[in-house]
Amino acid sequence: MIGKLDDYLRFNETALSLRSQRQELLASNIANADTPNYKARDIDFSNALQASLSKAAQTGPMATTSQGHIANGPAAADGKVLPDGTPVLYRNVSQGAVDGNTVDMDVERTQFADNALRYEAGITMINHQIHNLLAAIQNNQ
Amino acid sequence: MSLFNVFNVAGSAMSAQSQRLNTTASNLANADSATSASGEAYRAKQVVFEAVPVAGGSTAVKVREVVDDPSPMKQVYDPKHPLADDKGYVTMPNVNVVDEMVNMLSASRSYQTNVETMNAAKTMLLKTLTIGQ
């Protein structure tokens, strides 16, 4: 029964967790807009969500216990991953800067606002799910 | 909870930008300081930003060091000045006022952006608290 409740809420919970991690990355990009040689980074949200959901469906990730084992899960270009294994990618540069910084403030601000809005939408949806559950439990009284 | 990291990241950027603004203020204030405690004319200061990785994959920013501007000092011809050398030239600070004004605007805008980032994270966290209500 508890497993079913988990499954029911899993999609939105995974999406919210990824959204909050992406928000953190975008905040880092905005914070480092004036740092020389800083490269803007982001995650591929839809791939990351699918990977997280398929990972959650399995019993658990396989651990590498020896040097000879092939690492499990996706690896980013520089091996940089979020704590849940999502690869962190570098943003493509549209207008380069002389100091080697690749933060485009317009892109970052737009993505930041977009991500925040989608996060709030996710919260609204998880709230509706909880209300549906309550309605079922209380027989709509 | 990773959203709390946004406060650390944006906060680090705010303190770095305010230090940059402080340097700019110091440079503009001393744009005409022909001498100082060391007996030499004031040299413009510049901050060097550095990206610092923090836990959870995000990157904060800090001021690595404050460096003296290496550009040459201004030589002003003013024989009546008490600090003029035997040829009548006074060494004046190498502060470029135009650069400093641009720096000031950039620092103040970046500071504002980070305040907004922090506010957005705060709104999101408050919204998270409404789950299940």
Image (cartoon, rainbow, N blue to C red):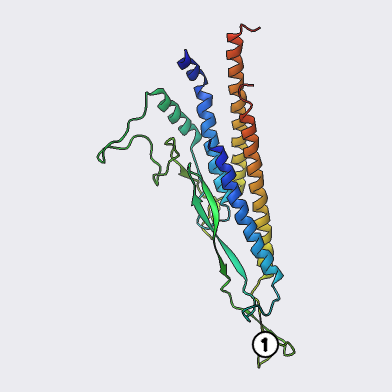
**Residue B108 place in picture, x, y as percent:** 68, 55
Q: Residue at x 52, y 26 (%)?
A: A13
Q: Say if residue A38 shows up in the picture.
A: no
Question: With respect to residue B3, does A36 lie above or below?
Answer: below
Q: Residue at x 40, y 47 (%)?
A: A78
Helix, strand or loop under label 1: strand
Image side of residue A25 versus residue B33, left or right: left
**Residue B7 place in picture, x, y as percent:** 59, 43
- Give the quadrant of the C terminus of chain A: top right
Q: Nearer the viewer, residue A66 or A93?
A: A66
Image side of residue B53 versus residue B122, left or right: left
**Residue A103 place in picture, x, y as percent:** 55, 50
Q: Nearer the viewer, residue B105 or A94?
A: B105
The residue beneath circle 1 is B89
Q: Quadrant of residue A110?
A: top right
Residue kind at label 1, given as amino acid type: Tyr
Task: Kindly give the residue lying farthest to the left in the view shown.
Answer: A68
Q: Nearer the viewer, residue B74 or B8?
A: B8
Count of picture labels:
1
Chain to which the residue tagged by mark 1 belongs? B
